[in-house]
Amino acid sequence: MKANKLLFGLAMLATATFAFTACGDDDDPTPNNGGNNNVTEKEAFLQNTNKNLVNETILPIYTALMNSNAELVEAIGEMETQADVNEACDLWKKARQYWEQSEAFLFGAASDYGIDPHTDTWPFDRAAFDNYISRYPDLADNEAAQAIVGEAIATGQSLTGFHAVEYLLFRNGQPRQVADITPAEVWFCQTAAEDLYLNSIMLVSSWGGKVNDEEQEMLDDAEFESSINYGENIINAGKAGSTYPTVTAGAVQILEGCQNIVDEVAHSKIGHPYTGEDVNYIESPHAYNSIQDFIDNVLSCVYTLNGGIGKDKSYTATSLTAYAMAHHPKEAAAVKAAVENALSKVGAMKRPFVLYYQDKSAGEAIEALEAFDSALGELKEALND
């Protein structure tokens, strides 16, 4: 990978903790209620918390995802040598990381427009893929076939997204050999990556972020226009027009988003294969990226709570962590200990997960994630009081 090495890999485990050290002086810890005497101190603080979530966490991560997907599309289209394939694999991991780090805020556009299941359903439907490839071996040059397969990619769930691209780029944790990748597979891979790019543009646009003219044209061609500005919706929590009836309800959504992904990692992503409920339910198996996915999901919670992408060792003065430290120190300390333990246990899982999904280390990770979920729940109760 040529960029973002700091965020990638197990090195994150050495630093990804709730080291509760406030940021610099440019973060004003004093809430500003704009002269509205009807706003309580709590509400004034959490108004800034909700704004911070959108501007310092959600939009930066979604924008980075969008830009990484654009790079991925270009790299796949230029694959001619083994080095090109290797580069495309690195870019898949880069984009993948930003997606996984967004899963604490799947509420909103990702859920409402079905972007999450469309781009991140697994396992990849290899039978359907093989059927298309055998039926259309000339897919790279057959416009009629491209229309049929392109429609399946654009409208399906298990034949597209990150795991379609993953399957076409990786085998057994390594980049595929360039000589083994057919022109039809390259076309399919790039088309799936283009669909990923389009969906990430939808996310940025829906949350009120900036897209360029070409990206806006892609939205127009797809006839997509969000019915709501999700960023403004949570920033304006408690005001007329917002779906959140109170400022606190917006902040509680932050905690619930974290709880939802922690529960999914524990009981679905790890739990389904570990318990034997579904041994095929393994995320990112071809890239051997499962455990990195889990780590990034936990980091998604850390960044969301601490108020900014990369805020793994500090927190902004308007973050939910800052509020919890000041007003609910017991619950904040419990979250700190729980997230550190969760990162440690997930990082210690035997690798690759696709081969060792029933190792006892997976069970230990589940227990740590359950404790993290519980600590978040206690903080949510305190916040609601």
Image (cartoon, rainbow, N blue to C red):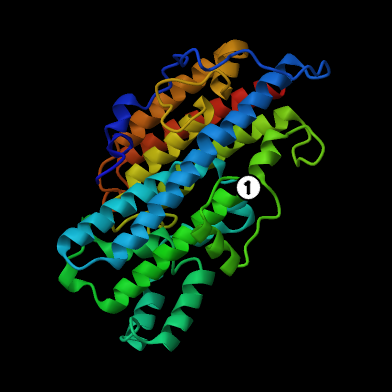
Residue 103 image point, x, y percent? 50, 44
Q: At 82% from the left edge and 15% from the top edge, which residue is drawn? A: 37
Q: Of the residues shown, which amino acid type is indicated by label 1?
A: Gly
**As rendered, which of 295 and 341 lies closer to the eye?**
295
Q: In this view, does 316 lie above or below 298?
A: above
Q: Is residue 210 above or below residue 72?
A: above
Left or right of 142? Residue 371 is: right
Left or right of 208? Residue 100 is: left
Residue 207 image point, x, y percent? 60, 46
Q: At 41% from the left edge and 17% from the top edge, which residue is drawn? A: 19
Mark 1 surroundings: few (<14), some (14-19) or many (≥20) residues within 10 A: some
Residue 26 image point, x, y percent? 51, 16
Q: Is residue 219 above or below residue 361?
A: below
| Residue 154 visible in the current orientation | yes
| Residue 263 visible in the current orientation | no
Left or right of 342? Residue 109 is: right
Q: Is mark 1 on a helix, strand or loop?
A: loop
Q: In this view, does 323 lie above or below 367?
A: above
Q: At 21% from the left edge and 57% from the top edge, which residue is drawn? A: 86
Which picture quadrant has residue 362? top left
**As rendered, which of 376 and 238 lies closer to the eye?**
238
From the image, which quarter does the C terminus lie in?
A: top right
Left or right of 340? Residue 52 is: right
Which picture quadrant has residue 321? top right
Q: Name the residue under label 1.
A: 108
Residue 162 image point, x, y percent? 40, 58
